[in-house]
Image (cartoon, rainbow, N blue to C red):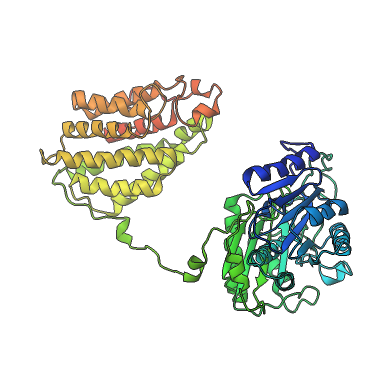
Amino acid sequence: MSAKHFINDPTHLVNTALQALTITNPSVALDAENKIIYRRPGHASQVSIISGGGSGHEPSFGAFVGEGLLSAAVAGTIFASPSAEQIRKAVMSRVDGEKGILVTVMNYTGDVLNFGMAAEKAKAAGLKVEMLVVGDDVGVGRAAAGKVGRRGIAGTVLVHKISGALAARGASLEDVYKVAKLTSDNLVSVGASLDHVHVPGRAPPDPKSDETLTSEEVEIGMGIHNEPGSGRAVVDLPELVTRMLAQMLDSKDEDRAFLKVNSNEVVLLINNLGGVSVLELGGITSEVVGQLEKTYNIKPVRILAGTYMTSLNGLGFSISILNVVNTDIGGPSMIQLLDAPSEAAGWTAPIKKETWEAKSSRTRDDASSGTEEVKPSGLKVSPEAFKTGLTGGLERVIAAEPDVTKFDTVVGDGDCGIGLKRGAEAVLKLLSSNELTGDIVLDLSKIVQVVENTMDGTSGALYAIYLNSLVHSLRQAASSSSSATPQIWATALQQASKSLANYTPAQPGDRTLVDALHPFVETLAETGDVKKAAEASRKGAEGTKGMKASLGRTVYVGGKGFEQVPDPGAWGLSEFFLGIAGVKSGEEGYEMV
């Protein structure tokens, strides 16, 4: 549980967050005194829908105010219901009451009482008001919930969207209430979290208290206000999802069989409770969808995944399933209403109706697109000599991995040696299983493909760019020569270096692999001697020891490690050059660092 916040004053936090909604959506206004977000006047008359609750569940509820969704939302303090007076102000004076008002509230005692009191006051004043209480959570079963009933959680957002879209079409209060209740009655949701959340302004909890989950535990059925669920467990994601779906869909569970999915159309909502990364939410979504189809033969017609109703920065998620039924009002359908456009900052459903209904399964899987046929160049090398030199270089790179890794652990993230070794081993495997043609462009092109597929990160990209450019330069050289002489190689290497400079500002002296590459290329151009060029490369690599980095991760790592070790990438490349020159380890005439 993180007790660190950028804003620790809860009152200031809520007030400024509400103000921000008017900044991100010009169509809404704020009654700051009563913490009401409402649509600015000027739109067509329609049934007004009001919701709200404690703060801390953003984007619910204020960010759902806008055309096609809510007319107003009333905010309490963090995890506490707004007062009846706040809500009365919203109902009586912040929305259009001409065609009636629907008050939608989640099933929490404080919310039900305060919104209910405001609704009754409005009725007494002569307004047409209906109130709907949403309870979609199955995390607590019938026995434990007792007379209180199910809690309201993220499925409520679907009630808001469907009823809001219907109201925007000019439907009557009777029909809007009817469809909202149908939606609520066909919803089940359940959440899970790896920890409770910390409310700004409160003392951090005792890490030894029963409230705190261990690092391995997950709370299944946790509510959106830190309420406990059905229990804690030590499970991986697949097992967790299995248990959650069983609570929602197992018709044999008498304590929780709240919904029988009997429709051909199902909507799935995967909701981030606030602290789950987008990457991980994607993995969760994939797991849920896979299990729904495999175990329950359910293929949702709409899948929404994102942040709709949070518990501050809760490290958890919830699953909601809507059993789509006939609205019995002569149209539109629930799906049409869900797809209808809206203008609310918190609603995220960017996929068009036509895209969902197309159900396209088309892919681009033509293998040739990734391995285009390379035309022979006519530029020849001795296959045996090329293989021998290349093998010597690759074997030296592999043998140098511990040193390169050690250097990179000091000044980087420690992956340079492993990356070079992985690429070298993959190229060696290619050489052992494929005969070289002797056409340098053909042979080097195959090597480039291996490098691209096995070496990642910054160094992988640099090598791929350089080698592709080298292939291009060698192909150009074939127009004037049929043999890849040292001078041909030198010229091609120089041209590849110029191409590399288009993508990186690295120059000699910046403490990068260029400090080993540049002297090799220039010495080869001057002498035509591969061994002298390799020795110059090693001197360049050694010269990076004590050289302060201008580029790369080392810049951010800081410290004085650069004074003790050479640049890992430069060292690894110099090892390769020494190997292709036939220099064995220990014969280069320079001390190992």
Direction from residue 508 to residue 328 in the image, left or right: right
| Residue in the image at 64% along x and 74% along y | 324
Direction from residue 552 to residue 503 in the image, left or right: left
* Residue 181 screen position, x and y as percent: 74, 71
Q: How many marks?
A: 0
Closer to the camera, 99 or 307?
Answer: 99
* Residue 531 screen position, x and y as percent: 25, 28
* Residue 368 screen position, x and y as percent: 29, 59
Instruction: Examine the rendering and report whether any part of residue 242 can be seen.
Output: no
* Residue 571 screen position, x and y as percent: 40, 30
Closer to the camera, 95 or 519?
Answer: 95
| Residue in the image at 22% along x and 27% along y | 524
Q: In the picture, residue 528 is in which quadrant?
A: top left
Closer to the camera, 70 or 365?
Answer: 70
397 vs 511: above or below? below
54 vs 551: above or below? below
